[in-house]
Image: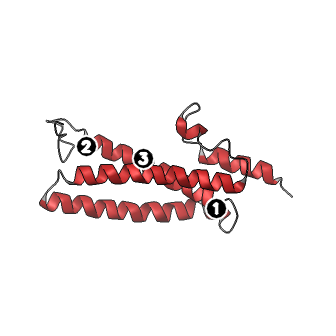
Amino acid sequence: MRSPTLYLQALLLASCASAQPGSEEFNQCTGARTQAAWNACESAGFSEAERRLATLYHSYSKRLQGEQRENFERAQAAWVRYRELACSFESSGVAGGSAYPAVFSACMREKTRRRLSELERLASCEEGDLSCPSVATKE
């Protein structure tokens, strides 16, 4: 039988694999001493990433009009669906277990952070960048 502590540590390391040592994301939940604390910490991390993404999404979408805005909204809706399905799959190895909420939330947080980076890049495009649909506005 495997040690529950060793299993929990392996899952925690896996959820932090994409974060760099010393970064806020890496250290965010390493102090969790119980499964419930780990689950709550990962959930809070996801909620914060989701809040930041929603803020940027609404701000950026206001700059778009017509078909461009509709395409952006459809793309975001498809991405939300992808994120949910991908994280359901990626955390399926622990489905039904006490670690599932933490592993699922960590996946959702990481995918949300990546999407946030994509939207930040799009929102900061400079005039003349042909790979961007909309240039950054002067604030």
**Rendered view: 97 above or below 61:** below
Horizontal side of 67 relative to 107 (left or right) equals left
Mark sitting on residue 114? 3
Q: CA distance from mark 2 to mark 3?
A: 14 Å
Horizontal side of 106 relative to 135 (left or right) equals right
Q: CA distance from mark 2 to mark 1?
A: 34 Å
Amino acid at the residue labelled 3: Arg
Crowding at dot 3, Cα within 10 Å, few <14 / some 14-19 / many 20+, comes out as some
Which of the marked residues, 3 or 1, is nearer the chain's N terminus?
Answer: 1
The residue sitting at 22% across, 61% down in the picture is 71
Residue named by callout 2: 123
SS state under label 1: helix
Q: Position of residue 17 (x, y in %)?
A: 59, 42
Which of the marked residues, 2 or 3, is nearer the chain's N terminus?
Answer: 3
Residue named by callout 1: 100
SS state under label 2: helix
| Camera-nearest residue between 74 and 51 | 51
Q: Quadrant of residue 50?
A: bottom left
Q: Position of residue 108 (x, y in %)?
A: 50, 56
Horizontal side of 102 relative to 124 (left or right) equals right
